[in-house]
Amino acid sequence: MKPHRFAALAASAVTVLGTVAVLNQSPATAAILACGTTNAALNRPATASSTENAGTPASAAVDGNAGTRWSSAFSDPQWLQVDLGSTQQICRVGLNWETAFARAFQIQVSGSATGPWTTIFSTTTGTGGNQTLDVAGSGRFVRMNGTARATQWGYSLWEFSVLTDDGGSTVPPTDPRNPDFGPNTFVFTPSTATADIQNRINTIAAQMRTNQFGTQRYAMLFQPGTYTANVDLRFYTQVAGLGLSPDRTNINGHVRVEADWLQQGSDPNNLGNATQNFWRAAENLSVHLPAGQIERWAVSQAAPYRRMHLSGQIQLWNGGDGWASGGLIADSRMDGVVVSGSQQQFLTRNSELNGGWNGSVWNMVFVGDPGSPAQHFPNPSHTVVDNTPKVREKPFLYLDGTGSYNVFVPAVRTNARGTSWSGGNPAGTPISLSQFYVVRPGASVATINAALSQGKHLLITPGVYHLNDTIRVTRPDTVVLGLGLATLIPDTGLPAISVSDVDGVKIAGLLVDAGSTNSPVLMDVGPSGSSASHAANPTSLHDVFFRVGGAGAGKATVSLRINSNDVIVDHTWVWRADHGAGVGWTVNTAANGVVVNGNNVIAYGLFVEHYQQYNVLWNGNGGRTYFFQNEMPYDPPDQASWSSGGGNLGWAAYKVANSVTTHEAWGVGAYCFFNVNRSIVASRGFEVPNVAGVRFHDLVAVSLGGVGTINRVINDTGAVANTANQISYVVSFP
């Protein structure tokens, strides 16, 4: 990330090989194995809403004979369903249509012949002929539900086939009292020698200090108790307490991030640059600073400080002249003053700022924070929202009083102010770790999906996992929790994760890294056409990060696509790499970072950078964003290569579709640094419909170092940001 006026990439990054989980053979072999080849519907019992006549029964569509067919009455809607005999993980559906085909239909699954039904595919533009649909869902019954015919006739299928995952995988049980968290997780107890704890911390810190694109991943977990430790937190390392609240795990010392390795500007001795301090996390700890000392959390993106209790002052940069570009504090209690220093932008959510806040650059956003500064924008640029309208905190691992491990799933809160835990035990639901499949390096996708189809949750331990198939989350209320920045790389062009249009899925603590074969999408939340309401039990994403390039020449058309309604995004960094390996305009290709098609989606902490078209494309109604940070792509070679058409120059960072009637955003910034061609111009940072229901508050456009131009902040409003006028603010729109 980061503009080269702020950060010169170190001449050589240290890369040390670590544990890599290769989940099968080569990509070519993996693609073949991704879905079974046996038709699970063949000669299984089939029923239909109607038949045209006795010669076209439902059974004719599953008999393996391409010369016989099912056809329905000449009306809408109609359906055909097959009983697979047991619940199975469905990965592909084939439809061989006769001339009378469906223009609009859904593929649905259920555990019962009478529903309820879960839609795993939907279209209103069916083409007939032979259709092969890659889907993700589990059920005993699979049906085609036709809602609009393409002809005056009924619906007619020569064959209806269903393929399932290969299976054959045994899902090992998890002992909640003695789980195996894999080779890269270190669990400390109050009886562990202080010197042993510190030696482990120091060893990991030394290895990961500059290891920005390495393959090591680590988690250091402290059981409830009191410790003396100086935690120097570096790349791809998570430190977390294992109590039900932060105050049950006390660190006398520090949990800190230093800016001490990346050159700033032209002086090789100035290493105070924090603008590449990414991918690390501190969670669920109470830190008591030594007398007279302060904490330092000099970070940029993807470095959450979450569920923490800090006794004293904290600095969010190196404390001197260093640059920083973060960041997130959430669900935390800060007893001393928070000094933001050079932080360009920062989100603080549902945290108690008992010592207050000091500092502002371009975009400081506070949502549901007692002790926050007063609303003022700009200079100081403090955007303040008193209450968080709807949020679920991130699930976390903890050890209960009996010595058993659980994952706690916090309850959804509305109009929330302050932390979820200061008043005592948080509201929510514990889930025994016995209900989880603990994924360790070497696990197969087939086993992961078998666990999910059995109703298991996933705890993914630290490692880099190369995927030969999609991890398919199909059941409501499933928890997928990563430790130590567990990283998923789809090697075959399939999505890394897909989520069905179901209630209450929680995905947290993962880095999804695009593979060298282009993925149309890295994560799909809900299939296309999702329409169910999840207002009472939304799906939520927490500290889920995406990367295209940097560690290698990754490619992905869309990184995160949200089709379901009511999804909550709780902190994400979605990044097309501007430095590292495999970086270039035609190398790490990526059109959109985030595409939102669902309605009533809420995002807290939306960091999306360097994508080649709209970084964010919001098609759903009722969307709300609290904090957005963007850098446009650095590397358009010329204006003709970077244009959305219609007379527009470049692409807006954040596009709300013309069809949208309601959308609102607070504290949003778009920056440019066109260092490959300084003459590049973006017409605007934000592009939205001119309707009363679309409102933006506290916007900024910045030309970083005056390198490049953004002509307007939003639509045709706001002054130019360029060499002469590098920062342009708009207080409200319209």
Image (cartoon, helix red, strand yellow):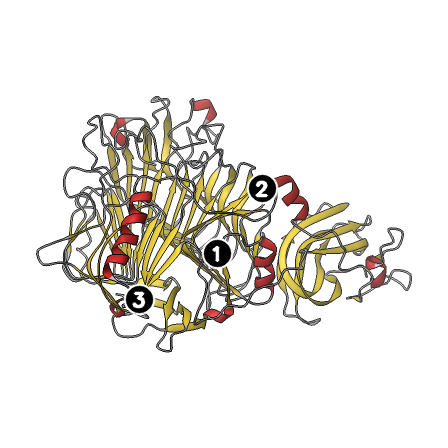
Give whichever of 122, 214 is nearer the camera: 214
> Residue under circle 3?
189
SS label for mark 2: loop
Q: Total number of numbered labels?
A: 3
Give the distance between the C-alpha atoms of the residues marked 1 and 2, in whole angstroms: 28 Å
| Marks 2/3: CA–CA distance | 42 Å
- For residue 706, say whether it is visible: yes
- Helix, strand or loop for disc 1: loop
Q: Is residue 230 left or right of residue 12?
A: left
Q: Amino acid type of disc 3?
A: Thr
- On the image, numbered disc 2 is attached to which residue? 493
Dot 3 lies on which element? loop
Nearer the observer, disc 2 or disc 3? 3
Task: Give the residue pinned by disc 1.
Answer: 599
Residue 673 point in image, percent of width and height: 32, 30
Which one is earlier in the sequence, the residue at label 2 or at label 3? 3
Mark 1 touches mark 3? (CB < 8 Å): no
- Return the residue found at the far right: 55
Q: Closer to the camera, 561 or 191?
A: 191
**Amino acid found under the numbered disc labelled 1:** Asn
